[in-house]
Image: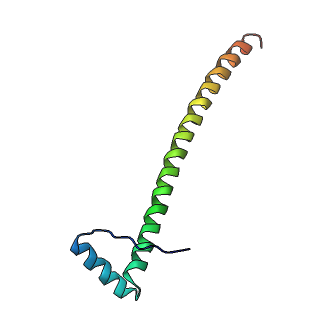
Amino acid sequence: MKAEHINITIPSDLRDAVDHQARRERTRRSTLIQKAVRVYLGLSRKRALRTLLKEGYAELGFEAKQLENEFARLDAESLKYAD
């Protein structure tokens, strides 16, 4: 993958923290920032997927409740003829 240079502005205390962590990991600042962005984007995608799944399960629950109510009505009607 071709790398591009970009310019970003960050507070000096954040830059210092990035530099400190990069030294601890014996890597370059840009490599550390790339890793951080990848992690952030992955978490963001997971959060979006979790939201979609939650909405989908809620919709399935609503549909299941409708089916349960319909079958309860049909069961009650059928039981009238059981005796």
User: Count of labels shown?
Assistant: 0
* Nearer to the camera, 7 or 25: 7
Give x and y (percent) for residue 38: 47, 68
Q: Residue at x 41, y 86 (%)?
A: 27
* Nearer to the camera, 60 or 51: 51
Give x and y (percent) for residue 79: 72, 15
Location of the C terminus by quadrant is top right
Image quadrant assignment for residue 72: top right
With respect to residue 83, does 69 lie above or below?
A: below
Give x and y (percent) for residue 19: 31, 82
Q: Residue at x 34, y 81 (%)?
A: 21
Give x and y (percent) for residue 82: 77, 14
With respect to residue 23, does 67 lie above or below?
A: above
Q: Residue at x 52, y 40 (%)?
A: 55
Pick out the residue farthest to the left: 12
Location of the N terminus by quadrant is bottom right
* Nearer to the camera, 3 or 15: 3
Q: Residue at x 60, y 30 (%)?
A: 63
